[in-house]
Image (cartoon, rainbow, N blue to C red):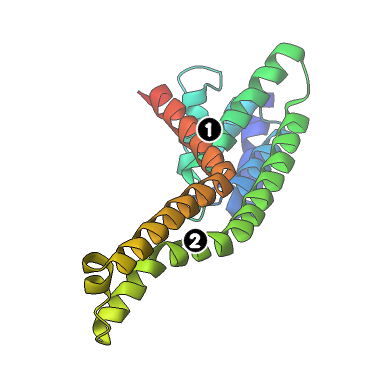
Amino acid sequence: YSCTVDRLLSLRTMRQRSPYLTSRHMGMTAMIAALTSFMRNGADIVTACEEVSGQSFASKEITLRRAINMVQATRDGSEENSQLMRAAHHIHAAYRLSARSGCEMVKCLEAVRASMRQQTRLDELRRQAFSMPLATIRLLTWLPVLSIALGELIGAKTLRFLFTSLPGAACLAVGASLYALGLVWTRSLTRTLRALKDEDSALIMTSKRTLR
């Protein structure tokens, strides 16, 4: 009994010294740091999750549903749903690994934290790398339409040339063929990005099914 009281008093003291540990919208990195701090102070992983999420669990285990609810309760608004779901799956996997192998949970959480930091940095670099090509693709996709509209505005009668004359029909056929080839080429260039988005969408759908 005295050990339990001492641990509760210790947790209360730590929360008073570190207000961010119980603040909502702290973000994934701060959330994992808070879990680690509670556990270093003597709490088990279930108690730490209850303290961080502000929820009480009916049983002494960390399910995927509880991990998802915890990361959603502590999100800071700048994190995407795929990042939150990935963090929840990592925390649940770390809990299962620690429960089965006896590995120290703090070390598992530190590994999750390092992995999430690396993944966040990777996502940012990927967005930076794809932002300029995607903007260029969008511009080039609409450029033929804009060119025809500009020709009509300045009185060049572009549509009449394209649809009422043989040279115009030839230009239209060649332009449409090149336009189609360009779309196929750009889709092949962005295949990697689409694959990553599909993977994130699948992760989100799996997590939603877990919450049902």
Looking at the figure, which quarter contains the C terminus?
A: top left
Vertically, is 171 above or below 57?
Answer: below
Report the number of numbered marks. Answer: 2
Is 72 or 162 nearer to us in this picture? 162
Vertically, is 122 above or below 55?
Answer: below
Residue drawn at point x = 21 percent, y = 73 percent: 160
Is 182 or 122 nearer to us in this picture? 182
Whole-percent x and y of residue 138? Answer: 45, 62
Disc 2, SS = helix
Q: Residues within 10 Å of mark 1 (few under 14, many from 20)?
A: some
Q: Tell which residue pokes out farthest to the bottom in this image.
A: 154
Looking at the figure, which quarter contains the N terminus?
A: top right
Of circles 1 and 2, the one toward us is: 2
Any part of residue 20 in sight: yes
Mark 1 vs mark 2, CA separation in Å: 47 Å
Which label belongs to residue 50? 1
Which label belongs to residue 137? 2
Is 153 or 159 nearer to us in this picture? 159
Kind of residue at disc 1: Glu
Vertically, is 130 above or below 45?
Answer: below
Kind of residue at disc 2: Ile
Whole-percent x and y of residue 15? Answer: 61, 47
Whole-percent x and y of residue 132? Answer: 57, 64
Q: Quadrant of residue 7?
A: top right
Which label belongs to residue 190? none
Position of 1 compared to 79: left or right?
Answer: right
